[in-house]
Amino acid sequence: MAAKFFRVAVEGQTTDGRTIERAHIQQMAARYNPQTFSARVWIEHLRSLLPTSEFRAQGDVLALKAEETEIDGKKRMALFAQIEPLPSLIEMVNKAKQKVFTSIELDPNFTQSGEAYMVGLGVTDTPASLGTERLAFAAQNPQHSPYAPLKQSPANVFSAAMETAMDFSDATPATQEIGGTGALAGMQAAFKAMTEFFSATKTAATPAAPANTPAAPAAPSGDAQQFAALMGHLKTMADGVTELSRNYSTLQLQHAALEEKFKTIDATDAAHYAQRPPATGATAAQLTDC
């Protein structure tokens, strides 16, 4: 079953005082192609590099379409998105009823084409997070806008958040595997695969010299130096992940040992302890109770 389309934005005000024009909506719908640039779904427009973060990507936008809709008695151009959600987004929206408002991030001059393109979709709890007070502040102080650090490009704009009737009950969730030690293992495997790939590429790019052939002049070493530097960085990162995994295992063992020690303390018979005798002062004389 094809995924549903949800209304995610309408023409109108943005978070910095600019306006999402009707033409922007139409351009985003006409130009959107996940093969060119895939817009992902993010919580509060926050993008994390860690796969186990609370702010990791929550899904992908598969397609966009533009349709005119009536809002408060006025005809406005609206943008509708077809979303492939991860299980965490389905749980968040369908069961927890959280993050049900959407705000798009659009680049008004994508790849210097002069046309708009949607580069991200944010989900938030309330439109107040993109409300009138912040709109006014951002418009008057663009360099200090609370949204500026979240943008992929300073020229990008965020639409004012709007309630979106998202229902993923019929959606097939994308695969999502997360976890503590599993994530570390996944990162190690990724670094290993990258190392093997570049090693194989280097080997394949250097064919064996024919027998009895005079040695060719030495080739410029720039590429080789860059490759060696890259391999060194990859190895350093892989070693760091391995050390992190080792430290994590050590902490687990120490934690388990502490738990056992506390259990022993709790089980100790209180009768084995004697109360400390009352203090009598610095001399051997006993105090008299008059």
Image (cartoon, helix red, strand yellow):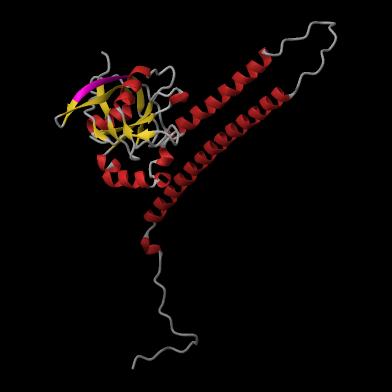
Instruction: Residue lying at the far bottom in this picture: please name it.
Output: 290
Residue 221 in the magenta stretch? The answer is: no
Q: Is residue 15 visible?
A: yes
Considering depth in this image, is 259 or 191 the residue closer to the camera? 191
- Residue at 49%, 46% (x, y): give it: 254
The number of discs equals 0
Considering depth in this image, is 72 or 6 the residue closer to the camera? 72
Q: Quadrant of residue 221?
A: top right
Q: Is residue 126 visible?
A: no
- Residue at 47%, 25% (x, y): give it: 112
Instruction: Residue lying at the far left in this picture: please name it.
Output: 73
Q: Which residues are magenta?
A: 64-69
- Residue at 56%, 27% (x, y): give it: 191
Residue 210 placed where, x, y %? 79, 6
Determine whether, in the image, residue 144 is placed left or right of residue 25: right
| Residue 102 vertical placement versus 256 (above, below) | above
Quarter the N terminus occupies:
top left
Quarter the C terminus occupies:
bottom left
Residue 79 placed where, x, y %? 28, 24
Determine whether, in the image, residue 238 is placed left or right of residue 130: right
